[in-house]
Image (cartoon, rainbow, N blue to C red):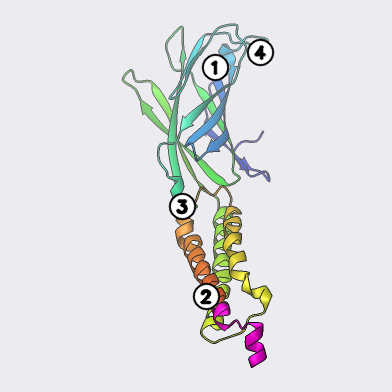
Amino acid sequence: MDYGKEDKLKTSNDVLSHTEAEDRVDLDFRVLSTDLAKRTMRVYVGIYPNGAYSNDDERTWNKTVEFQFLHKNLVVKKGSTPEPVTFEIPLQTGNLRDYPFDKYATNIWFIAIDNSTRDAVPANVYSLVLNQNTNTRIIRESEFDADGIELQIYNIYINRTPLVFAFCLFISVVTWGLTIVAFNIAIDSMIFKRELPPPLLAIGIAMLFAMPTLRKAQPDIPEIGCAIDFLCFIWCEILIGISSCMILYSWLLRYKTPWDKTEA
């Protein structure tokens, strides 16, 4: 795989850390899934030995190495086979109620220690992230602990993709457009005494129940009460509800019984 590129599957892969040392470990960091409702990110880390840390068969470890992550620690023993590790990272900031303007941030740090020398092991770190409804950016920083060992810190930032923003804007425009149409029909019916054909009498009620379905078409939208609802959905539901009452009430006021029609 060529790291540092994007493909048509909406994935981005980057080289987060690179070393020229032959005696090193390679880490394949992948984001498996992101649950914004639970504020967690599930990650996969593949660990591969190179140089002095790999046996001649290139399938087993030649040394015992201790790996320390912020959320998980493990020790790979000499002679063992490289196995990937998966764990969850909690998202530290962000609120789903800000949808689709919600932004999240978290971090993870990593260090590999040679168990025989207690020195840090050089590492190449690669990342692979699927960008479907969210953009995920990983930025590397470095810090040193009290013993002078470098810690690799990776700050992770998550936000909605431009496609989600565009689709939410489209749904908002359609919602307001239908609301204005229903409100105009109600004004014409009540104030200007326009007589509506029977099929139009239920247009407001039909829209009232269709709006929640239209709202759910937005990708990964949470329950009612997020930011996008206060821009269109809540106000549109109120206006359509008022319009429905106006249409039906004006029809009732002008309704004539068969006896009234006979007398006329």
Q: Which mark is residue 45?
A: none
Disc 4 residue crowd, few under 14, some 14–19, many 20+, Cα 10 Å: some
Image location (x, y in percent) of residue 173: 56, 66
Query: Mark 1 or 4, which is nearer the eye?
Result: 4
- Find out whether residue 36 is within the magenta segment: no
6 is higher (above) or lower (below) than 78: below
The reply to whether the C-beta atoms of the residues labelled 3 and 4 are less than 8 Å apart is no
Residue 184 seen anywhere in this rendered image of the structure? no
Q: Percent x, y for residue 54?
A: 60, 12
- Span shown in magenta: 249-264
Point 43% across, 25% down: residue: 70
Q: Quick one: 62 or 30, which is closer to the camera?
A: 30
Residue annotated with mark 2: 246
Secondary element at tag 4:
loop
User: Which amino acid type is marked by label 3?
Assistant: Cys
Instruction: Say whether marks 1 and 3 touch (CB < 8 Å).
Output: no
For marks 4 and 2 on the same chain, the one whose residue lies earlier in the sequence: 4
Residue at x 40%, y 30% (from the top left corner): 142
Amino acid residing under circle 4: Arg
